[in-house]
């Protein structure tokens, strides 16, 4: 098996920005405001911050330490690293999900990314055709119709049968091709020249544009003749909790799921990125810094911009209603009405969706790197071959989702299972491996190697007991609340059920391929004498 030259980050700031770039994405600017609006605004924020403290940060620290330790043993993929920490084959095969998640999310994420770019282009070209003076009902019809046309939700393959356009393809298809090409180009450039470079430039641009738009939103006047639609009302909706909402398990479930999706914890990305760090590189402060950066973009920019602006122009009731069609829909369906009524609305609309596009591309670039590393160490192929395989695999998934667009069933199916449920499973495996199998004391000792700050002692108890228990409740609740309805839909006799089954077949083929590659890799690692079952300490 050919030994590949070890990749490294160009700087510590580079890896922090890259991990933050992976975390900062559509989950911050679309999913978080939608979740908050769906779940009572301020009532959502209490379980959200508890999940951050008890799940996101401690499991994130564990993942950073696990990845760096695995890298010292010569491993960079989730299957091999989890095999080391779980001390056996079951960990390796559970780690397959740590490759499936970023790859599977990439299948649909690039498509949403192309929607954002298309909206930028439309706003720069004169807007979406929403008349800010028209009745709200007419504006809702216009924005929802535009979104349905862009997504091709009317029928499978409709984006490739659009009359009056070049080759009969909807323009979004060309936007998708441009977006996919950008992703492939930067993935080929590798860690420091590709992912790190993009994040170093994109993150500051996002922050500057976001702050400008936030200042504009916070200085908006309430529409004439309205009550309950001021900036203060928007801020109050987001920060004043309705304590009755806290009795709903759905609110707690949504908050925990948002933390995992947003921070990329259990995603398979952090464990790969940190594997390229050296023994004395600080994973404690790096983990905390990347989490704090993500929270700034999510709560300060994403939440305050989207929720506050929506309340100012359409009120609390329509803001909550706009999020019911899916947590990602609030930005696409509601904010165009906001921009239509705002002075220089097309300029602010273009800037906002540019932020979404930059946030999305910094995330999507990270999603192929774990699979690249997995292929290189399992099959012994060089970086060019692994990149070619993974980009073609990702492109196949993109095209699948781009074709099966009816009611966005393929996208929602992958997001439900790969982008939500499997993340909880991987996070659970990681925290059990760190706190119980490897041992919480040894794990914290590993995390503190080279650390400029120590993890507070209370987190020893949280990591070993609170996080696993919290996670178990979330997974059981997830199954009780969402699984029965989904299974009824999956096995029904409808077009949506048929599309769901096709999507599952595609996912099962992907999983089978990853399992087979893991088995091949295990034979190679054992033949090379590598400590794939974690029986020996890491060599320094």
Image: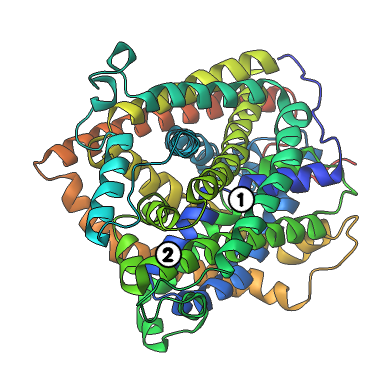
Residue shown at 20% from the left, 45% from the top: 490
**Residue 498: percent from the left, percent from the top?**
17, 35
Do callouts 2 and 1 mark residues in contact (Cβ within 8 Å)?
no
Position of 106 relative to 41 (above/below): above
Q: Residue at x 77, y 18 (%)?
A: 3
Q: Earlier in the sequence, mark 2 or mark 1?
A: 1
* Residue 450, image x, y percentages: 91, 55
Classify mark 2: helix, strand or loop: helix
Question: Which of these two is toward me, 129 or 456?
Answer: 129
Quadrant where the C terminus is found in the figure? top right
Question: Residue 243: image x %, image y %?
Answer: 42, 88
Q: Residue at x 70, y 33 (%)?
A: 195
Q: Which residue, given by chain and number where applicable, does mark 2 sit on?
A: 310
Q: Which residue ends up furthest to the left in the rendered image? A: 493
Q: Which residue is mark 1?
A: 24
In percent of width and height, residue 186 lies at 66, 25
Is 158 positioned to the left or the right of 45 in the image? left
Q: Is residue 31 visible?
A: yes
Q: Nearer the viewer, mark 2 or mark 1?
A: 2
Q: Classify 10 Å Cα crowding around label 1: few (below 14), some (14-19), many (20 and above).
A: many
Q: Is residue 219 above or below residue 496?
A: below
| Distance Cα–Cα, label 2 vs label 1 | 21 Å
- Residue lying at 31% horizontally and 67% vertically, measured from the top left: 318
Position of the N terminus by quadrant: top right
Q: Secondary structure at mark 1?
A: loop
Q: Is residue 319 left or right of residue 453?
A: left
């Amino acid at each position: 098996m050919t030994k590949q030259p070890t990749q490294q980050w160009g700087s510590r700031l580079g890896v922090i920005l890259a991990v933050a770039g992976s975390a900062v994405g559509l989950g911050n600017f679309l999913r978080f405001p939608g979740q908050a609006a769906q779940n009572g605004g301020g009532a959502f924020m209490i379980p959200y911050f508890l999940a951050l403290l008890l799940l996101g940060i401690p499991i994130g620290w564990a993942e950073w330490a696990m990845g760096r330790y695995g890298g010292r043993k010569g491993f960079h993929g989730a299957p091999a690293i989890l095999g080391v920490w779980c001390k056996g084959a079951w960990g390796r095969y559970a780690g397959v999900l740590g490759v499936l998640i970023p790859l599977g999310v990439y299948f649909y994420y690039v498509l949403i990314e192309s929607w954002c770019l298309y909206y930028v282009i439309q706003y720069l070209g004169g807007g979406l055709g929403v008349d800010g003076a028209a009745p709200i009902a007419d504006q809702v019809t216009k924005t929802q119709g535009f979104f349905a046309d862009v997504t091709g939700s009317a029928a499978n393959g409709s984006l490739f049968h659009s009359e009056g356009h070049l080759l009969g393809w909807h323009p979004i298809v060309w936007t998708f091709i441009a977006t996919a090409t950008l992703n492939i180009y930067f993935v080929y450039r590798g860690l420091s020249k590709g992912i790190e470079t993009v994040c170093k430039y994109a993150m500051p641009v996002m922050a500057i544009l976001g702050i400008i738009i936030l200042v504009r939103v916070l200085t908006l006047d309430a529409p004439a003749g309205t009550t309950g639609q001021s900036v203060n009302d928007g801020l109050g909706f987001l920060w004043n909790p309705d304590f009755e909402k806290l009795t709903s398990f759905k609110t707690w479930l949504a908050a925990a799921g948002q933390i995992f999706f947003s921070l990329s914890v259990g995603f398979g990305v952090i464990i790969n990125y940190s594997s390229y760090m050296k023994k004395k590189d600080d994973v404690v402060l790096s983990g905390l810094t990347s989490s704090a950066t993500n929270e700034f973009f999510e709560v300060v920019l994403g939440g305050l911009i989207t929720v506050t602006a929506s309340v100012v122009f359409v009120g609390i009731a329509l803001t909550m209603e706009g999020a019911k069609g899916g947590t990602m829909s609030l930005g696409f369906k509601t904010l165009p009405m906001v921009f239509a009524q705002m002075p220089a609305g097309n300029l602010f609309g273009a800037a906002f969706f540019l932020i979404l596009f930059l946030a999305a591309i910094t995330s999507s670039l990270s999603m192929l790197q774990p699979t690249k590393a997995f292929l290189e160490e399992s099959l012994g192929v060089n970086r060019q071959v692994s990149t070619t395989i993974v980009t073609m695999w990702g492109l196949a998934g993109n095209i699948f989702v781009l074709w099966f667009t009816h009611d966005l069933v393929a996208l929602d199916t992958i997001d439900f299972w790969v982008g939500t449920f499997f993340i909880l499973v991987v996070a659970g495996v990681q925290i059990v491996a760190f706190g119980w199998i490897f041992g919480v004391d040894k794990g914290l000792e590993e995390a503190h190697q080279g650390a400029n700050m120590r993890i507070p002692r209370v987190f020893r108890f949280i990591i070993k007991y609170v996080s696993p228990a919290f996670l178990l409740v979330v997974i059981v609740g997830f199954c009780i609340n969402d699984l029965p309805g989904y299974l009824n839909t999956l096995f029904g006799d409808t077009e949506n059920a048929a599309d769901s089954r096709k999507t599952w077949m595609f996912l099962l083929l992907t999983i089978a391929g990853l399992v087979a590659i893991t088995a091949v890799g295990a034979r190679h690692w054992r033949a090379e004498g590598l400590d794939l079952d974690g029986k020996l300490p890491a060599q320094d």
